[in-house]
Amino acid sequence: MDLGLGNVSSLAGQLVSLSYGRDMERVTDLRGAKYLEASGLRSDGWRLFLCVASGT
């Protein structure tokens, strides 16, 4: 009898890896911004680009 538990456990594993990936990406973005600023470069270019592109 298949209760679909394999699919549930697979989904749970994917959600855990997504959460981990997003946390790591956030840390990387923050570190990158700090490195740019320490080098005397602006770190807000992407945010400004997205604001201009979206018209806000």
Image: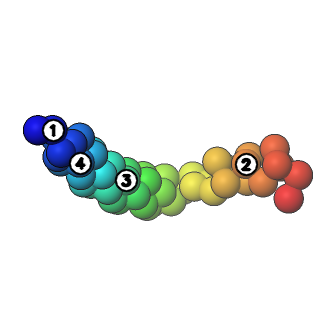
Going by the image, does 40 lie left or right of 4? right
Q: Earlier in the sequence, mark 4 or mark 1?
A: 1
Q: Kindly give the residue lying farthest to the right in the view shown.
A: 55
CA gap between label 3 and label 4 equals 21 Å
Whether residue 27 is visible to the viewer of this picture, yes or no, is yes
Asked whether disc 1 touches disc 3, contact meaning CB atoms under 8 Å apart, the reply is: no
Q: Which residue is mark 2?
A: 50
Mark 1 or mark 3, whichever is nearer to me: 1
Secondary structure under the numbered disc 4 in the rendered image: helix
Q: Amino acid at mark 3?
A: Arg
Per the model, the C-alpha gap separating discs 2 and 3 is 20 Å
Q: Residue at x 74, y 46 (%)?
A: 49
Q: Nearer the viewer, mark 4 or mark 2?
A: 4
Above or below — where is 49 with respect to 38? above
Q: Which residue is mark 3?
A: 22
Crowd band around label 3 with a 10 angstrom C-alpha radius: few (<14), some (14–19), many (20+): few
Q: Is residue 9 above or below residue 31?
A: above
Label 1 Cα crowd, 10 Å radius (few <14 / some 14-19 / many 20+): few
Which residue is at 18% across, 45% downward? 3
Q: Secondary structure at mark 3?
A: helix
**First-in-chain label (3 vs 4):** 4
First in sequence, mark 4 or 2: give its number: 4
Q: Which disc, if any, is residue 2?
A: 1
Q: Position of residue 19 (x, y in %)?
A: 32, 56
Q: Earlier along the polypeptide chain: callout 2 or callout 1?
A: 1
Q: Which residue is mark 4?
A: 8
Q: CA distance from mark 2 to mark 1?
A: 47 Å
Q: Amino acid at mark 1?
A: Asp
Instruction: Specify the farthest residue to the front.
Output: 1
Quadrant assignment, res 20: bottom left
State the image coordinates of residue 44 (x, y, percent, origin top left): 63, 56
